[in-house]
Amino acid sequence: MKALELKKDFHKLIDSIDNETLLSEFYSLIKRKISAKEGNLWNKLTKKEQEELNLAFEESKNPENLISHEDMRKKHKKWL
């Protein structure tokens, strides 16, 4: 889908919503996304947290360190 087509569909979607609360939430979400700066969350992490995330990412490349989605769901069933 090209940008122009997306914009048209987006306008149609917005025009079809009559719920003011939903429109307000939608507006806030889109506005936040537009004004968010890339890398902001990363920059809020401490150096140690960044290093830990990088290490976890590298470790995730080894299949031996991974578990299946089903096993993860079983392990954390009480929170799901």
Image (tube, rainbow, N blue to C red):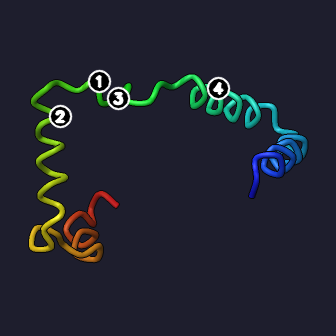
Q: Mark 1 points at which residue?
A: 43
Instruction: Provide the residue designation for mark 3.
Output: 41
Q: Depth check: give the residue in front, 16 or 59.
A: 59
Position above or below: 10 against 47: below
- The CA distance from mark 1 to mark 4 is 21 Å
Whole-angstrom CA distance, mark 1 to mark 2, is: 9 Å
Disc number for residue 31 = 4
Check disc 2 and report the residue beneath it: 50
Is the Cβ of the residue at disc 3 closer than 8 Å to that at disc 4? no
Dividing the image into 4 quarters, which one contains the C terminus? bottom left
The image shows residue 18 at horizontal and vertical percentages of 88, 39
Residue placed at 18% from the left, 72% from the top? 67
Q: What residue type is labelled 4?
A: Lys
Left or right: where 61 falls relative to 1? left
Query: Are the residues at dot 1 and dot 4 in contact (C-beta closer than 8 Å)?
Result: no
Percent coordinates x, y for residue 25 in the rendering: 67, 32
Residue type at mark 1? Asn
Residue type at tag 3: Leu
User: Disc 1 or 4, which lies upstream in sequence?
Assistant: 4
Q: From what the image shows, is residue 25 above or below residue 9?
A: above
Q: Which of marks 1 and 4 is in front?
A: 1
Left or right side of 22 for 79: left
Q: How crowded is mark 4: few (under 14 residues within 10 Å), some or many (20 or more)?
A: few
Mark 2 vs 4: CB contact within 8 A? no
Q: Which amino acid does label 2 sit on?
A: Gln
Instruction: Decide which of tag 3 and tag 4 comes sooner along the chain.
Output: 4
Q: Estimate the x, y position of residue 62 in percent, counting from the top left.
A: 12, 68
